[in-house]
Amino acid sequence: MTSSTNALRRFGRIFLTSAFAASMSLFGTSCDHLHDPHDHDHDHDAVTTVTLTLVAQGTTDTTRVTWEDLDGIGGNNPNRIDTLFLRPATIYLGSVRFENRAKSPIEDVTEEVLEDANEHQVFYAVSNSLGQLQVLDKDGRGLPLGLVYSLSTALTTAAVPGALTLSLYHYDSESSKNGTDPADETDVEVTFPLILR
């Protein structure tokens, strides 16, 4: 493991801790499970809003994008999907935040994912070879969690379009999570258009 990877992991832990401390002070600590009859008779988090924050390594250059579907899955189309514009040949440290903004006060679902980390995992996919993404955080058993990650963008001189897709999976139990395979149940899946320029 290289020193740069170790530094990224340390920075990721600090970044995640600070992000959660701020979110708890703003939005409280409660989280709600809502029953969805279409999800195999299991309780799930209601996620209306997903926000990605990426900071270019060695800078304060911050990119933030949001996906939002306030009426929930099965209603109207999402009311907001931002495009992720990133620089080529750049390493970004990123975090993801899940919220339920249909509630008042707003519920920070990310906190619940962190508390039940052994039963959650965020999977990522970047299309068109526009980047390599590495999850930096782990659950209590040392398996990937996915709330903090690094993204190394490709070297390209053209504004190549692609996408970054993330899926938050909720496992029935700790034993059903192995760190590699997705669960049968998805709390939310989001695709952000991605352009390097």
Image: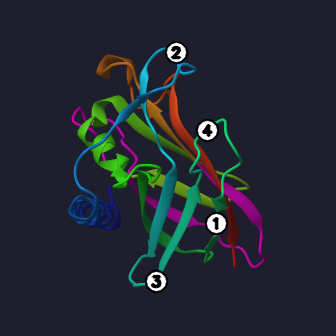
* Residue tagged 4: 73
Name which of mark 2 and mark 3 comes first in the sequence.
2
Circle number at residue 127? none
Residue 142 highlighted magenta (yes or no): yes
Are dots 4 and 2 in contact, CB under 8 Å? no
Secondary structure of the residue carrying tag 3 is loop
Q: Nearer the viewer, residue 177 or 154?
A: 177
Where does the C terminus fall, quadrant-wise?
bottom right
Which amino acid does the dot numbered 2 rest on? His
Per the rendered image, the range of residues in magenta is 136-165
SS type, badge 4: loop
Of labels 3 and 4, the one closer to you: 4
- How far is mark 4 from mark 2, CA to CA? 15 Å
Quarter of the image where one finds residue 88: bottom right
Q: Residue at x 41, y 37 (%)?
A: 121
Q: Position of residue 160 (x, y in %)?
A: 77, 68
Quick check: 18 left or right of 103?
A: left
Q: Name the residue under label 2.
A: 40
Q: What whole-number distance in Å separates the C-alpha atoms at marks 3 and 4?
A: 33 Å
